[in-house]
Image (cartoon, rainbow, N blue to C red):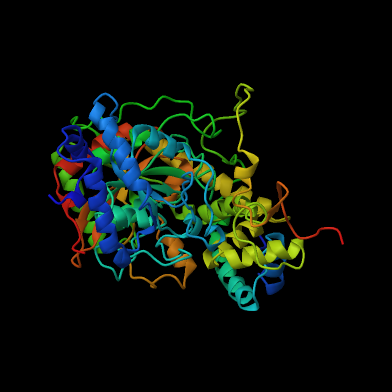
Amino acid sequence: MKLQNITISRLQKLLLNRKISPQEITQALLARIREKNSRVNAYLTVAEDEAPAQAGVADKRLGKGDGACPLTGIPLAIKDNICIKGVRMTCASKILEHYVPPYNATVIERLSDQGYVLLGKTNMDEFAMGSSTENSGFAPTRNPWDTRCVPGGSSGGSAAAVAAGMCAAALGSDTGGSIRQPAAFCGVVGLKPTYGLVSRYGLVAFASSLDQIGPITRDVRDAAILLSAIAGHDPRDSTSAPKQPPDYLSKLGQSINGLRLGLPKEYFAEGLDPEVAASLEAAREVFSRLGVQFQEVSLPHTDYSIAAYYLIAPAEASSNLARYDGVRYGHRTSKPKNLLQMYYDSREEGFGAEVKRRIMLGTYALSAGYYDAYYLKAQKVRTLIKRDFDLAFTEVDALLTPTAPSPAFRLGEKVTDPLQMYLSDIYTNSVNLAGLPAISVPCGFTANGLPVGLQLIGPAFGEDRLLTIAYAYERETDWHTRRPNL
Amino acid sequence: MEQTPKLTVADVEYVANLARLSLTDEEKQSLTEELARILAYIEKLNQLDTAEIPPTSHVLSLSNVLREDKVAPSLRREVALENAPQAEAELFKVPKIIE
């Protein structure tokens, strides 16, 4: 196997047995990035200096033997909305083009404690607002399977970097599907944790009641390894759940015979691409062979989730993005006439079209006279959506759905129609509204060679169950082992 | 939301002012059309009777998260100023507020 396509679990063994050094794998991946990033544009910043230095530190830890952790010497890519002290972080926005965080996100502290190697920061839709990475303030990322297509978004750079062999694994963030949908489009595994499982400290806020950081990896075991490293209570995030995460690795390989999977009938209705539907049907057969019982369930408020989401997320975003005022950090317009004009022009020049659109939508929904009609209404519908899931989980152990209604679409296909773009999150964003965990796993390819993903949704804090189910499926299939020809 | 008013350019200008965005005329025009279409789609929420439904602002049942009041170091002043567009005498510098 080529080094560039190695999994974390395989790399761990080679590193521990000293068959390969952290410097060797790091240099191999940096070379791959130099060779291929101009085609894919997965990275906004490559850690040319930091990566070799961190690999050297990891090498010493591995040499001592007792200092090694699961991620010691493992080279990772990090989405560019997660703060790393001293490394430029842009959120793919002109407004933060030159911003260098003075502190580490909690997830970065945890990875650093284990001795990971930072390869770089990955491209995304500006402030994570988008489903294609075309909203990047710099340049879009391209899908490694077909560079005419989008990689999905907003964590498109992270998913493309994993698919293209430009890192061992990556972190993304998911507010309405931003880990799972790009994972599906790029043929890799993406896990969105339960709200509150992973600290948001140091994650640039988009919609605070929905955002979660999670892993994007080549297989399910790697997702479990990376989740184990970042999950757990953080006193610096007041929305962090005071819970001890279970062992995500010990149950991998357990039988799923007798398990009940629900098929939400609203997810297999009109609008689902026939090739995606066929891949899901084939996946069902695999699960049936493993002894899984299927049951149709109903999530009757599915059709309202996009509407509720596109009130709640922009409302929270408009409030969160008020901080970009050109005073303490970020872009400031040159020669402002006065303070007020400085706010207007700095924001006008710094934000891209989709970010402005959402700030406007959110501000409108929260403005005097409209709060009850829009924002409060959406929060009530959020309750109904959450209740749908609660009820479904009294009947089944998890839900099986497509991750996205179609495979990766072409660049430019949906950019002129924001609403069409929003509708591509139909199967993912109600999961964020309900705060649940979900994982996307490769489950096939279209005739044109584009990956298809299935989504498993679990009850709150059911990541261990989801990983066990996904692992059982993955062992029976080889979709996750296929790599694009770049 | 029962009687959603039609969105006008003046509405967009009003909201842009609240959001501190100085939009171009072209942006005002396109945002008026785009937001109207999105709001029309969002209208579908009115099909649901939510009179008796409590709102969910947050999925975790956490409230009043308290911690011990311990003294810990904060960012040093010069570090906090490193990203400032303009700084002077240990302060963030902005255009004159009082004429």
**Left or right: A267, with A304 as reference point:** left
As drawn, A323 above or below B40: above
Where is residue B62, by image quadrant?
top right
Where is residue B76, by image quadrant?
top right
x%, y% of residue B11?
A: 70, 68
**Left or right: A188, with B72 as reference point:** left
Where is residue A462, by image quadrant?
top left
**Left or right: A115, with A340 as reference point:** left
Q: Residue at x 68, y 72 (%)?
A: B8
x%, y% of residue A473?
A: 19, 42
Looking at the picture, tell me which residue is in the foreground, A463 or B38.
A463
Query: How many numbered marks are there?
Result: 0
**Left or right: B46, with A397 as reference point:** right
Q: Residue at x 49, y 45 (%)?
A: A203
Q: Residue at x 29, y 26 (%)?
A: A67
As drawn, A394 above or below A42: above
Looking at the picture, tell me which residue is in the foreground, A277 or B84.
B84
x%, y% of residue A409?
A: 33, 67
Q: Residue at x 60, y 38 (%)?
A: B75
x%, y% of residue A76?
A: 32, 46
Is residue A84 visible in this depiction of the protein?
A: yes
Quarter holding the C terminus of chain B is bottom right
Is residue B15 visible in this depiction of the protein?
A: no
Quarter holding the N terminus of chain B is bottom right
Looking at the picture, tell me which residue is in the foreground, A419 or A372.
A419
Looking at the picture, tell me which residue is in the foreground, A400 or B61.
B61
Most extreme residue toward the bottom is B26
